[in-house]
Image (spheres, rainbow, N blue to C red):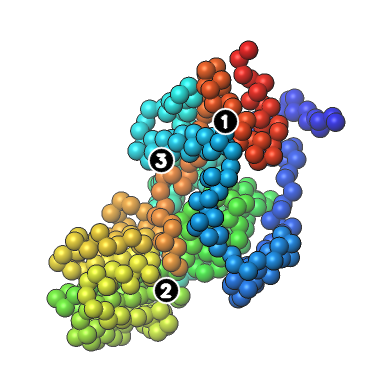
Amino acid sequence: MALRRLDLRGFDGDRRALTGLLPRPVDEQDRSSDTVAAILADVRADGDAALKRLTATFDKVELDELRVPAEEISAALARIPPALQEALDVAHDRILAYHAHEAADVPEDFTNAGITVRHLIRPVGRAGCYAPGGRARYPSTVLMCAVPAQVAGVREIVLCVPPGPDGHVDDATLAAAAVAGVTEVYAVGGAQAIGAMAYGTQSIDAVDVIVGPGNRYVAEAKRQVSGVVGVASAFAGPSEVVVIAGPDTPSELAAIDLVVQAEHGPDGLAWLITWSEELIDRVDAAVDRIVAASPRRSDLEATLGSGGYAVLVDGPKRACAVSNVVAPEHLEILTDDAASLLSHIDSAGAVFLGTNAPASIGDYLAGPNHVLPTNRTARFASALRVDDFRKHIHAVSVTDEAVRTLGPHVETLAETEGLPAHAQSVRLRWPG
Protein backbone atom coordinates (compact mmCIF):
# COMPACT_ATOMS: atom_id res chain seq x y z
CA MET A 1 0.00 0.00 0.00
CA ALA A 2 1.52 3.30 -1.12
CA LEU A 3 1.56 6.15 1.36
CA ARG A 4 -0.03 9.39 0.28
CA ARG A 5 2.61 11.96 -0.56
CA LEU A 6 2.62 15.69 0.09
CA ASP A 7 5.15 17.88 -1.69
CA LEU A 8 5.76 20.96 0.45
CA ARG A 9 8.89 22.15 -1.35
CA GLY A 10 8.94 25.91 -1.50
CA PHE A 11 6.81 26.27 1.63
CA ASP A 12 7.75 29.60 3.25
CA GLY A 13 6.89 28.65 6.85
CA ASP A 14 3.63 30.60 7.24
CA ARG A 15 1.46 28.77 9.74
CA ARG A 16 -1.87 29.63 8.14
CA ALA A 17 -0.64 28.61 4.70
CA LEU A 18 0.66 25.30 6.03
CA THR A 19 -2.66 24.63 7.75
CA GLY A 20 -4.37 25.01 4.38
CA LEU A 21 -1.92 22.68 2.66
CA LEU A 22 -2.13 19.81 5.13
CA PRO A 23 -5.10 17.44 5.12
CA ARG A 24 -7.55 18.19 7.89
CA PRO A 25 -8.54 15.38 10.25
CA VAL A 26 -12.13 14.21 10.08
CA ASP A 27 -14.14 16.16 12.62
CA GLU A 28 -15.37 13.23 14.66
CA GLN A 29 -16.87 15.68 17.15
CA ASP A 30 -19.40 16.86 14.56
CA ARG A 31 -20.04 13.31 13.43
CA SER A 32 -20.72 11.91 16.90
CA SER A 33 -22.05 14.86 18.89
CA ASP A 34 -25.75 14.02 18.54
CA THR A 35 -25.20 10.39 19.50
CA VAL A 36 -23.11 11.32 22.53
CA ALA A 37 -25.63 13.96 23.62
CA ALA A 38 -28.41 11.36 23.54
CA ILE A 39 -26.33 8.88 25.56
CA LEU A 40 -25.45 11.45 28.21
CA ALA A 41 -29.06 12.57 28.51
CA ASP A 42 -30.14 8.94 28.91
CA VAL A 43 -27.58 8.30 31.68
CA ARG A 44 -28.46 11.51 33.48
CA ALA A 45 -32.17 10.66 33.41
CA ASP A 46 -32.14 6.90 34.12
CA GLY A 47 -28.84 6.19 35.88
CA ASP A 48 -28.00 2.49 36.27
CA ALA A 49 -30.95 1.38 34.15
CA ALA A 50 -29.58 3.42 31.26
CA LEU A 51 -26.09 2.00 31.74
CA LYS A 52 -27.39 -1.57 31.58
CA ARG A 53 -29.56 -0.79 28.56
CA LEU A 54 -26.70 0.91 26.70
CA THR A 55 -24.28 -1.88 27.56
CA ALA A 56 -26.71 -4.38 26.07
CA THR A 57 -27.03 -2.23 22.94
CA PHE A 58 -23.37 -1.45 22.31
CA ASP A 59 -21.48 -4.28 24.01
CA LYS A 60 -24.13 -6.99 23.49
CA VAL A 61 -23.92 -8.00 27.17
CA GLU A 62 -26.76 -8.19 29.70
CA LEU A 63 -25.52 -7.21 33.17
CA ASP A 64 -27.21 -7.74 36.52
CA GLU A 65 -24.60 -5.76 38.47
CA LEU A 66 -22.27 -3.02 37.25
CA ARG A 67 -19.66 -3.09 40.00
CA VAL A 68 -17.03 -5.84 39.81
CA PRO A 69 -16.72 -7.58 43.21
CA ALA A 70 -13.54 -6.82 45.16
CA GLU A 71 -12.71 -10.53 45.53
CA GLU A 72 -12.85 -10.95 41.74
CA ILE A 73 -10.36 -8.11 41.31
CA SER A 74 -7.88 -9.57 43.79
CA ALA A 75 -8.31 -13.10 42.42
CA ALA A 76 -7.31 -11.91 38.96
CA LEU A 77 -3.69 -11.59 40.08
CA ALA A 78 -3.60 -15.32 40.74
CA ARG A 79 -5.11 -16.13 37.36
CA ILE A 80 -2.76 -14.20 35.07
CA PRO A 81 0.57 -15.65 33.84
CA PRO A 82 3.61 -14.87 36.04
CA ALA A 83 5.29 -13.01 33.18
CA LEU A 84 2.33 -10.65 32.87
CA GLN A 85 2.23 -9.99 36.61
CA GLU A 86 5.95 -9.19 36.59
CA ALA A 87 5.50 -6.87 33.61
CA LEU A 88 2.62 -5.06 35.33
CA ASP A 89 4.71 -4.67 38.49
CA VAL A 90 7.69 -3.29 36.58
CA ALA A 91 5.51 -0.88 34.59
CA HIS A 92 3.69 0.25 37.76
CA ASP A 93 6.92 0.95 39.63
CA ARG A 94 8.47 2.87 36.74
CA ILE A 95 5.34 4.96 36.14
CA LEU A 96 5.13 5.69 39.86
CA ALA A 97 8.78 6.74 40.02
CA TYR A 98 8.44 9.12 37.10
CA HIS A 99 5.29 10.80 38.37
CA ALA A 100 6.74 11.15 41.86
CA HIS A 101 9.69 12.94 40.23
CA GLU A 102 7.24 15.11 38.30
CA ALA A 103 5.24 15.96 41.43
CA ALA A 104 8.41 16.99 43.25
CA ASP A 105 9.02 19.56 40.48
CA VAL A 106 12.70 18.65 40.24
CA PRO A 107 14.40 20.44 37.33
CA GLU A 108 16.82 17.61 36.50
CA ASP A 109 16.11 14.98 33.86
CA PHE A 110 14.59 11.75 35.13
CA THR A 111 16.76 8.67 34.69
CA ASN A 112 15.77 5.17 35.72
CA ALA A 113 17.58 1.98 34.68
CA GLY A 114 18.73 3.13 31.29
CA ILE A 115 15.77 5.30 30.27
CA THR A 116 16.13 9.07 30.47
CA VAL A 117 13.17 11.43 30.21
CA ARG A 118 13.71 15.09 29.42
CA HIS A 119 10.90 17.48 30.29
CA LEU A 120 10.30 20.06 27.57
CA ILE A 121 8.03 23.06 28.12
CA ARG A 122 6.71 24.88 25.05
CA PRO A 123 4.22 27.73 24.78
CA VAL A 124 1.18 27.50 22.53
CA GLY A 125 1.61 29.51 19.36
CA ARG A 126 -1.55 31.60 19.55
CA ALA A 127 -3.78 32.42 22.53
CA GLY A 128 -7.29 33.85 22.47
CA CYS A 129 -8.41 36.08 25.35
CA TYR A 130 -12.00 37.06 25.99
CA ALA A 131 -12.96 40.12 28.05
CA PRO A 132 -16.64 40.78 28.80
CA GLY A 133 -18.32 44.02 27.82
CA GLY A 134 -21.77 45.47 27.48
CA ARG A 135 -22.70 46.07 31.12
CA ALA A 136 -19.20 47.19 32.08
CA ARG A 137 -15.66 47.33 30.83
CA TYR A 138 -12.95 45.10 32.23
CA PRO A 139 -9.40 46.24 31.47
CA SER A 140 -8.32 44.21 34.51
CA THR A 141 -9.49 41.03 32.75
CA VAL A 142 -7.37 41.92 29.73
CA LEU A 143 -4.32 42.07 32.00
CA MET A 144 -5.25 38.86 33.81
CA CYS A 145 -5.61 36.94 30.55
CA ALA A 146 -2.76 38.38 28.51
CA VAL A 147 0.00 38.70 31.10
CA PRO A 148 0.36 34.97 31.90
CA ALA A 149 0.29 34.27 28.15
CA GLN A 150 3.08 36.78 27.73
CA VAL A 151 5.09 35.17 30.54
CA ALA A 152 4.56 31.75 28.96
CA GLY A 153 6.16 33.02 25.75
CA VAL A 154 3.09 32.98 23.50
CA ARG A 155 3.95 34.76 20.25
CA GLU A 156 0.44 35.86 19.23
CA ILE A 157 -2.10 37.06 21.81
CA VAL A 158 -5.58 37.80 20.49
CA LEU A 159 -8.28 39.73 22.36
CA CYS A 160 -11.99 39.61 21.58
CA VAL A 161 -14.25 42.10 23.38
CA PRO A 162 -17.80 43.26 22.64
CA PRO A 163 -17.94 46.70 20.99
CA GLY A 164 -19.59 49.60 22.75
CA PRO A 165 -22.76 51.31 21.48
CA ASP A 166 -20.64 53.38 19.09
CA GLY A 167 -19.08 50.27 17.54
CA HIS A 168 -15.69 50.85 19.14
CA VAL A 169 -13.78 49.19 21.96
CA ASP A 170 -13.34 51.63 24.85
CA ASP A 171 -9.98 53.25 25.55
CA ALA A 172 -9.41 51.63 28.95
CA THR A 173 -9.67 48.16 27.44
CA LEU A 174 -7.44 49.05 24.48
CA ALA A 175 -4.89 50.66 26.79
CA ALA A 176 -4.77 47.50 28.90
CA ALA A 177 -4.24 45.49 25.70
CA ALA A 178 -1.31 47.73 24.80
CA VAL A 179 0.21 47.42 28.28
CA ALA A 180 -0.15 43.62 28.26
CA GLY A 181 1.37 43.04 24.83
CA VAL A 182 -1.79 41.93 23.03
CA THR A 183 -1.00 41.58 19.33
CA GLU A 184 -4.54 41.70 17.87
CA VAL A 185 -7.87 43.09 19.12
CA TYR A 186 -11.26 42.32 17.58
CA ALA A 187 -14.54 44.07 18.38
CA VAL A 188 -16.50 40.83 18.68
CA GLY A 189 -18.22 39.48 21.78
CA GLY A 190 -20.49 36.71 22.99
CA ALA A 191 -20.55 33.07 21.94
CA GLN A 192 -19.76 34.19 18.39
CA ALA A 193 -16.34 35.44 19.52
CA ILE A 194 -15.55 32.06 21.07
CA GLY A 195 -16.57 30.36 17.82
CA ALA A 196 -14.41 32.70 15.78
CA MET A 197 -11.33 32.05 17.90
CA ALA A 198 -11.93 28.29 17.92
CA TYR A 199 -12.66 27.75 14.24
CA GLY A 200 -11.19 30.82 12.55
CA THR A 201 -12.88 33.19 10.12
CA GLN A 202 -11.77 35.33 7.19
CA SER A 203 -10.60 38.00 9.63
CA ILE A 204 -9.63 36.02 12.73
CA ASP A 205 -7.16 33.15 12.63
CA ALA A 206 -7.97 30.21 14.90
CA VAL A 207 -6.15 30.06 18.23
CA ASP A 208 -4.76 27.19 20.28
CA VAL A 209 -6.16 28.16 23.70
CA ILE A 210 -9.13 30.31 24.75
CA VAL A 211 -9.23 31.97 28.17
CA GLY A 212 -11.31 34.57 29.95
CA PRO A 213 -14.64 34.87 31.77
CA GLY A 214 -18.04 35.68 30.32
CA ASN A 215 -21.77 35.21 30.70
CA ARG A 216 -23.43 31.81 30.54
CA TYR A 217 -23.53 31.88 26.73
CA VAL A 218 -19.80 32.53 26.51
CA ALA A 219 -19.13 29.81 29.07
CA GLU A 220 -21.30 27.32 27.19
CA ALA A 221 -19.60 28.20 23.91
CA LYS A 222 -16.23 27.48 25.49
CA ARG A 223 -17.54 24.15 26.77
CA GLN A 224 -18.67 23.20 23.28
CA VAL A 225 -15.41 24.09 21.54
CA SER A 226 -13.27 22.41 24.20
CA GLY A 227 -11.31 19.74 22.41
CA VAL A 228 -11.10 21.80 19.24
CA VAL A 229 -9.00 24.24 21.27
CA GLY A 230 -7.72 24.21 24.82
CA VAL A 231 -10.11 25.85 27.29
CA ALA A 232 -8.55 26.90 30.57
CA SER A 233 -10.20 27.56 33.92
CA ALA A 234 -13.22 25.34 33.45
CA PHE A 235 -16.51 27.18 33.06
CA ALA A 236 -15.33 30.70 33.91
CA GLY A 237 -18.87 32.04 33.90
CA PRO A 238 -21.01 34.35 36.06
CA SER A 239 -19.34 35.54 39.25
CA GLU A 240 -19.69 33.75 42.59
CA VAL A 241 -18.79 34.32 46.24
CA VAL A 242 -19.23 32.45 49.50
CA VAL A 243 -18.67 34.50 52.64
CA ILE A 244 -18.04 32.54 55.83
CA ALA A 245 -18.70 34.79 58.81
CA GLY A 246 -18.99 34.44 62.56
CA PRO A 247 -20.93 36.33 65.25
CA ASP A 248 -18.18 38.97 65.50
CA THR A 249 -17.80 39.61 61.76
CA PRO A 250 -18.68 43.24 60.90
CA SER A 251 -22.02 42.93 59.09
CA GLU A 252 -21.23 45.84 56.73
CA LEU A 253 -18.14 44.01 55.45
CA ALA A 254 -20.00 40.77 54.86
CA ALA A 255 -22.84 42.65 53.15
CA ILE A 256 -20.66 44.70 50.81
CA ASP A 257 -18.70 41.62 49.76
CA LEU A 258 -21.92 39.81 48.85
CA VAL A 259 -23.03 42.82 46.82
CA VAL A 260 -19.63 43.03 45.09
CA GLN A 261 -20.21 39.73 43.28
CA ALA A 262 -23.84 40.53 42.47
CA GLU A 263 -22.55 43.72 40.84
CA HIS A 264 -21.07 41.64 38.02
CA GLY A 265 -24.49 40.88 36.59
CA PRO A 266 -27.13 38.16 36.24
CA ASP A 267 -26.79 34.46 37.06
CA GLY A 268 -24.26 35.16 39.80
CA LEU A 269 -24.07 33.55 43.23
CA ALA A 270 -23.69 35.26 46.62
CA TRP A 271 -23.84 33.02 49.70
CA LEU A 272 -23.43 33.91 53.35
CA ILE A 273 -22.59 30.91 55.55
CA THR A 274 -22.61 31.48 59.30
CA TRP A 275 -23.38 29.92 62.66
CA SER A 276 -25.02 33.14 63.92
CA GLU A 277 -28.68 33.77 63.13
CA GLU A 278 -28.32 37.29 64.53
CA LEU A 279 -25.55 38.00 62.01
CA ILE A 280 -27.84 36.97 59.15
CA ASP A 281 -30.37 39.56 60.32
CA ARG A 282 -27.71 42.27 60.47
CA VAL A 283 -26.27 41.35 57.06
CA ASP A 284 -29.73 41.32 55.47
CA ALA A 285 -30.34 44.84 56.73
CA ALA A 286 -26.94 46.03 55.51
CA VAL A 287 -27.47 44.50 52.06
CA ASP A 288 -30.81 46.30 51.81
CA ARG A 289 -29.14 49.63 52.57
CA ILE A 290 -26.31 49.09 50.08
CA VAL A 291 -28.59 47.93 47.28
CA ALA A 292 -31.06 50.78 47.82
CA ALA A 293 -28.25 53.33 47.42
CA SER A 294 -26.65 51.70 44.36
CA PRO A 295 -27.05 53.06 40.81
CA ARG A 296 -27.28 49.39 39.78
CA ARG A 297 -30.13 48.67 42.15
CA SER A 298 -32.33 46.78 39.69
CA ASP A 299 -29.47 44.54 38.54
CA LEU A 300 -28.41 43.84 42.11
CA GLU A 301 -31.94 43.00 43.19
CA ALA A 302 -32.34 40.61 40.27
CA THR A 303 -29.04 38.82 40.91
CA LEU A 304 -29.49 38.57 44.68
CA GLY A 305 -33.10 37.56 44.22
CA SER A 306 -32.10 34.50 42.21
CA GLY A 307 -28.62 33.74 43.57
CA GLY A 308 -28.41 35.26 47.06
CA TYR A 309 -28.48 32.85 50.03
CA ALA A 310 -27.84 32.88 53.78
CA VAL A 311 -26.99 29.49 55.25
CA LEU A 312 -27.08 28.83 59.00
CA VAL A 313 -24.78 26.02 60.18
CA ASP A 314 -23.59 24.52 63.46
CA GLY A 315 -20.09 25.99 63.45
CA PRO A 316 -16.98 26.98 61.46
CA LYS A 317 -16.03 23.46 60.32
CA ARG A 318 -19.56 22.82 59.10
CA ALA A 319 -19.45 26.13 57.23
CA CYS A 320 -16.32 24.93 55.44
CA ALA A 321 -18.02 21.64 54.57
CA VAL A 322 -20.96 23.48 53.00
CA SER A 323 -18.59 25.76 51.10
CA ASN A 324 -16.73 22.75 49.70
CA VAL A 325 -19.98 21.46 48.23
CA VAL A 326 -20.74 24.87 46.69
CA ALA A 327 -17.11 25.00 45.40
CA PRO A 328 -17.29 28.76 44.84
CA GLU A 329 -15.23 30.93 42.56
CA HIS A 330 -14.37 33.23 45.50
CA LEU A 331 -14.39 32.20 49.16
CA GLU A 332 -14.00 34.83 51.86
CA ILE A 333 -13.42 33.73 55.45
CA LEU A 334 -14.19 36.86 57.47
CA THR A 335 -13.18 35.62 60.91
CA ASP A 336 -10.26 36.38 63.21
CA ASP A 337 -9.05 32.79 62.96
CA ALA A 338 -9.50 32.55 59.18
CA ALA A 339 -6.14 30.88 58.55
CA SER A 340 -6.97 28.07 60.98
CA LEU A 341 -9.94 27.09 58.80
CA LEU A 342 -7.89 26.84 55.62
CA SER A 343 -7.05 23.19 56.29
CA HIS A 344 -10.77 22.38 55.99
CA ILE A 345 -11.09 23.94 52.51
CA ASP A 346 -10.55 21.73 49.47
CA SER A 347 -12.73 23.26 46.72
CA ALA A 348 -12.58 26.97 45.89
CA GLY A 349 -11.19 29.04 43.05
CA ALA A 350 -9.51 31.50 45.43
CA VAL A 351 -9.66 32.02 49.19
CA PHE A 352 -9.44 35.39 50.94
CA LEU A 353 -8.49 35.26 54.62
CA GLY A 354 -9.62 37.75 57.22
CA THR A 355 -11.49 41.03 57.19
CA ASN A 356 -8.66 42.87 55.38
CA ALA A 357 -8.84 40.63 52.31
CA PRO A 358 -11.94 41.27 50.18
CA ALA A 359 -12.19 39.46 46.85
CA SER A 360 -11.90 42.84 45.10
CA ILE A 361 -8.21 42.91 46.08
CA GLY A 362 -7.82 39.69 44.11
CA ASP A 363 -9.85 41.12 41.25
CA TYR A 364 -7.21 43.73 40.57
CA LEU A 365 -3.74 43.45 42.02
CA ALA A 366 -3.08 40.73 44.58
CA GLY A 367 -1.11 38.99 41.84
CA PRO A 368 -2.90 35.64 41.31
CA ASN A 369 -5.37 35.49 38.48
CA HIS A 370 -8.98 36.61 38.80
CA VAL A 371 -10.09 34.29 36.00
CA LEU A 372 -11.42 31.51 38.22
CA PRO A 373 -13.55 28.37 37.87
CA THR A 374 -17.28 28.81 38.52
CA ASN A 375 -20.41 26.65 38.55
CA ARG A 376 -18.83 24.11 40.94
CA THR A 377 -15.91 23.43 38.58
CA ALA A 378 -13.53 24.44 41.40
CA ARG A 379 -13.98 20.79 42.40
CA PHE A 380 -11.43 19.99 39.70
CA ALA A 381 -10.25 23.23 38.09
CA SER A 382 -7.98 26.08 39.15
CA ALA A 383 -7.27 29.73 38.52
CA LEU A 384 -5.85 30.72 35.15
CA ARG A 385 -2.07 30.39 35.24
CA VAL A 386 1.00 30.40 33.04
CA ASP A 387 0.77 26.65 32.57
CA ASP A 388 -2.58 27.06 30.78
CA PHE A 389 -0.59 28.56 27.90
CA ARG A 390 2.11 25.90 27.86
CA LYS A 391 2.47 22.31 26.77
CA HIS A 392 4.60 19.71 28.51
CA ILE A 393 6.44 17.31 26.23
CA HIS A 394 8.55 14.40 27.42
CA ALA A 395 11.52 13.31 25.33
CA VAL A 396 12.61 9.72 25.98
CA SER A 397 16.00 8.13 25.26
CA VAL A 398 16.85 4.45 25.89
CA THR A 399 20.16 2.64 26.27
CA ASP A 400 20.99 -0.74 24.73
CA GLU A 401 20.94 -2.33 28.16
CA ALA A 402 17.47 -0.92 28.92
CA VAL A 403 16.11 -2.37 25.69
CA ARG A 404 17.59 -5.75 26.63
CA THR A 405 16.25 -5.81 30.20
CA LEU A 406 12.91 -4.04 29.76
CA GLY A 407 12.06 -5.16 26.24
CA PRO A 408 10.60 -8.53 27.31
CA HIS A 409 8.16 -6.76 29.63
CA VAL A 410 7.08 -4.49 26.78
CA GLU A 411 6.63 -7.57 24.60
CA THR A 412 4.48 -9.26 27.25
CA LEU A 413 2.22 -6.26 27.73
CA ALA A 414 1.87 -5.64 23.99
CA GLU A 415 0.94 -9.25 23.27
CA THR A 416 -1.53 -9.23 26.17
CA GLU A 417 -3.24 -6.25 24.57
CA GLY A 418 -3.30 -7.90 21.16
CA LEU A 419 -0.80 -5.53 19.56
CA PRO A 420 1.83 -7.70 17.84
CA ALA A 421 3.49 -4.83 15.97
CA HIS A 422 4.15 -3.12 19.30
CA ALA A 423 5.95 -6.24 20.50
CA GLN A 424 7.87 -6.63 17.25
CA SER A 425 9.04 -2.99 17.36
CA VAL A 426 10.92 -3.78 20.56
CA ARG A 427 12.19 -7.21 19.49
CA LEU A 428 13.79 -5.66 16.42
CA ARG A 429 15.83 -3.38 18.65
CA TRP A 430 17.21 -5.96 21.06
CA PRO A 431 21.00 -5.99 20.78
CA GLY A 432 22.20 -9.15 19.11
Label annotation for residue 79 = none
Q: CB under 8 Å between callouts 3 and 1? A: no
Q: Position of residue 283 (x, y in %)?
A: 24, 82
- Residue at 60% of width from left, 15% of height from top? 431
Where does label 2 land, which residue?
A: 268
Nearer-the-camera pick, 195 or 171: 195
Q: CB under 8 Å between callouts 2 and 1? A: no
Q: Position of residue 206 (x, y in %)?
A: 62, 48
Nearer-the-camera pick, 306 or 182: 306
- Residue at 62% of width from left, 19% of height from top? 430
Q: Residues within 10 Å of mark 2 (few under 14, many from 20)?
A: many
Residue type, mark 2 in image:
Gly
**Residue 373 quadrant:** bottom left
Alpha-carbon span between mark 2 and mark 1: 54 Å
Residue type, mark 3 in image:
Val
Mark count: 3
Q: Determine the secondary structure under disc 3.
A: helix
Where does label 3 land, which residue?
A: 151
- Residue at 14% of width from left, 76% of height from top? 248
Q: Earlier in the sequence, mark 3 or mark 2?
A: 3
- Residue at 24% of width from left, 83% of height from top? 280
Alpha-carbon span between mark 3 and mark 2: 31 Å
Nearer-the-camera pick, 1 or 67: 67
Q: Position of residue 79 (x, y in %)?
A: 58, 45
Q: Residues within 10 Å of mark 3 (few under 14, many from 20)?
A: few
Quarter occupied by the C terminus: top right
Where does label 1 land, which residue?
A: 409
Q: Determine the secondary structure under disc 1.
A: helix
Residue 58 visible in the displayed image: no
